[in-house]
Image (tube, rainbow, N blue to C red):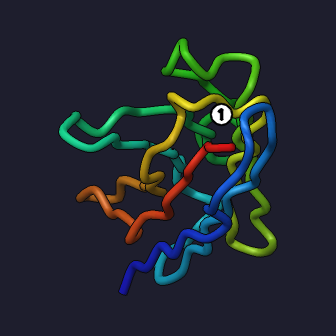
């Protein structure tokens, strides 16, 4: 079955960096777009970045969250079935649970990984 497992979250100081990873299995990874979402307590889940599949857009990336533009970068490694989110210049308002997502017929989600930005 489809599985998405995020890792790499944690505590970081303001201005610091983290790289989130998502290990995908159970589907033909290179065929599908992959996305990162985030969700703050009490708020709706927000789309952050999308990376296209080789089938649709040859790995083209699209940013959907103005607040992270220029700071976050999505990438993928089709040989390893992995998708990443490099987060730089982290801010106190960035703390959220970050989720990996793909849409086959349905949306599939990982369990999320927590990011905390604090001194």
Give me the residue at 56% from left, 50% from top.
116
Q: Which residue is mark 1?
A: 57
Figure check: 2 above or below 63: below
| Residue 45 horizontal/vertical position (percent) | 29, 39
Give me the residue at 55% from left, 71% from top.
28
Quadrant in which the N terminus is drawn: bottom left
Q: Residue furthest bottom?
A: 1
80 horizontally vs 45: left or right: right
Figure check: 9 above or below 15: below
Q: Quadrant of residue 76?
A: bottom right
Figure check: 73 above or below 117: above
Give me the residue at 75% from left, 51% from top.
18
Q: Quadrant of residue 30?
A: bottom right
Q: Quadrant of residue 20?
A: bottom right
| Residue 19 horizontal/vertical position (percent) | 75, 54
97 horizontally vs 30: left or right: left
């Amino acid at each position: 079955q489809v599985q998405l497992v995020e890792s790499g979250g944690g505590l970081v100081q303001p201005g610091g960096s983290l790289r989130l990873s998502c290990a995908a299995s159970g589907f033909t990874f290179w065929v599908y777009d992959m996305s990162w979402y985030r969700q703050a307590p009490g708020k709706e889940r927000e789309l952050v970045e999308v990376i296209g599949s080789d089938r649709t857009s040859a790995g083209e990336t699209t940013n959907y969250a103005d607040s992270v533009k220029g700071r976050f970068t999505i990438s993928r490694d089709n040989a390893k079935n992995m998708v990443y989110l490099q987060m730089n210049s982290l801010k106190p308002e960035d703390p959220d649970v970050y989720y990996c997502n793909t849409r086959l017929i349905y949306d599939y989600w990982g369990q999320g990984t927590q990011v905390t930005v604090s001194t």
